[in-house]
Amino acid sequence: MTAPVSASRRRIRHRPLAGEPADLRLTDRQQQQLSLWSAELNAAASWHGELPVALLESCWLRLRRVPVQRLAAALPPDGSESAPELVRYRELCQSGLDSWSSQLQCWHDFGSGAFQQAQQRFWQHQERGNHGWTLSRYLGLVERYRRSLVPGGRRELPLLRLARQGSEDAHQLFWLPAGRGPIGHTCA
């Protein structure tokens, strides 16, 4: 004998988004939210910081909108490898200086404490992981998003599917065409 299903429980239907990989499955409500955000994107006259970025937490079936200007705060990118101390160290090594001499030069330029702190932050991020969400991926998203809003550009809404906490999976970035909506009837 089975217990009756509560009327408050809803069956959630998952469907792949048209034109996107089948592993991006969204509920009807999530697709409606994306349609609203696409309409907002299409209504924008130009680039601005309030444009939407969609963040999908698949395991919680949660889709939320983050303004692009607040994306770095909502999902901080790992910029540890871009620390000036480490950039300089790599430049010195690539110019032919051995690693010990490069390190000594960086200690001189930045101070040994600052250089060691930059190294420590870098290795902590390597161990802890940031699901592949690096400063270069973040900047690439912003640049592509900005380019999609130039006149004649193909407007696309960025959707980041977040990896599960504790997993080694990377966040996945999808670019969803911001449809222009249904074409009106043009016959007279």
Image (tube, rainbow, N blue to C red):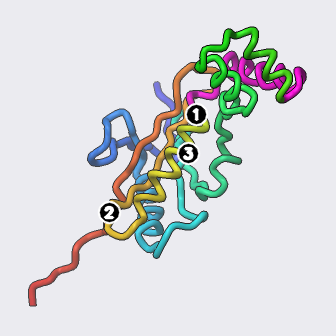
Identify which residue is drawn at 36% across, 70% down.
151
* Residue 136, image quadrant: top right
In terms of sequence position, does the residue under pointer 3 or pointer 1 come before the other? 1
Query: Label 1, on which residue?
Result: 133
Find residue 179 and name its label: 2
Please tell me whether mark 2 or mark 3 is closer to you in this view. 3
Q: Which residues are magenta?
A: 110-133
Q: Is residue 116 above or below residue 29?
A: above
* Magenta stretch holds residue 114: yes
Tell me the distance, in whole angstroms, between the alpha carbons under discs 2 and 3.
24 Å
Please tell me whether mark 2 or mark 1 is closer to you in this view. 1
Residue 53, percent from left and from top: 53, 53
Query: Label 3, on which residue?
Result: 139
Image-based side of 131 in relation to 101, left or right: left
Tell me the distance, in whole angstroms, between the alpha carbons under discs 3 and 1.
10 Å
Q: Is residue 11 above or below residue 35?
A: above
Between residues 55 and 108, which one lies in front from this camera angle? 108
Residue 83, percent from left and from top: 72, 32
